[in-house]
Image (spheres, grey):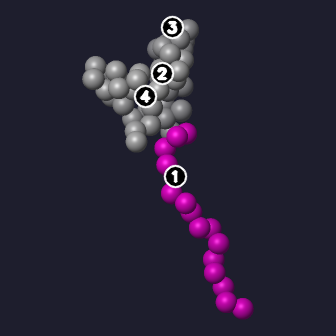
Amino acid sequence: MKSFYDYDVDNPAERQERYTIYPELSRFHMTLQDELTDDEYQTYFESEKRSVEPKPAVNNFQTRWI
């Protein structure tokens, strides 16, 4: 399933699908766009998008046999 941030907002069908699947988050972002400048909103959007990206699990432990 796509994350809210994976939809192409320039595509009307994808924008409608995103609104259908994530109605509260969509309304929140519409309100944010009204309240923030374009630069502020884009900065916020990109930081949120990065925060929900899956991150690979890193194993920092080295296995040593004693």
Q: Nearer the viewer, mark 1 or mark 4?
A: 4
- Label 3 Cα crowd, 10 Å radius (few <14 / some 14-19 / many 20+): few
Quadrant housing the N terminus: top left
The residue type indicated by label 3 comes to: Asp
Decide: marks 2, 3 in contact (CB < 8 A)? no
Residue on which disc 4 sits = 21
Res. 46 in view: yes
Q: Which residues are magenta?
A: 51-66
Sequence-first disc among 2 and 3: 2
Q: Residue at x 53, y 32 (%)?
A: 48
> Could you tell me residue 18's position as x and y percent?
39, 26
Decide: marks 2, 1 in contact (CB < 8 A)? no
> Could you tell me residue 14's position as x and y percent?
31, 26
Q: Secondary structure at mark 2?
A: helix
Q: CA distance from mark 2 to mark 1?
A: 26 Å
Decide: marks 1, 3 in contact (CB < 8 A)? no
Residue ranking furthest to the front: 20
> Could you tell me residue 39's position as x and y percent?
48, 18
Residue on which disc 1 sits = 55
Residue on which disc 3 sits = 34
Q: Nearer the viewer, mark 4 or mark 3?
A: 4
- Residue 17 vs residue 28, the one in the foreground: 17
Q: Main secondary structure of the magenta part?
A: loop
> What label sits on residue 23 in the rendered view?
2
Q: Determine whether 41 is above or below 4 in the image.
A: above
Q: Secondary structure at mark 1?
A: loop
Q: CA distance from mark 1 to mark 3?
A: 31 Å
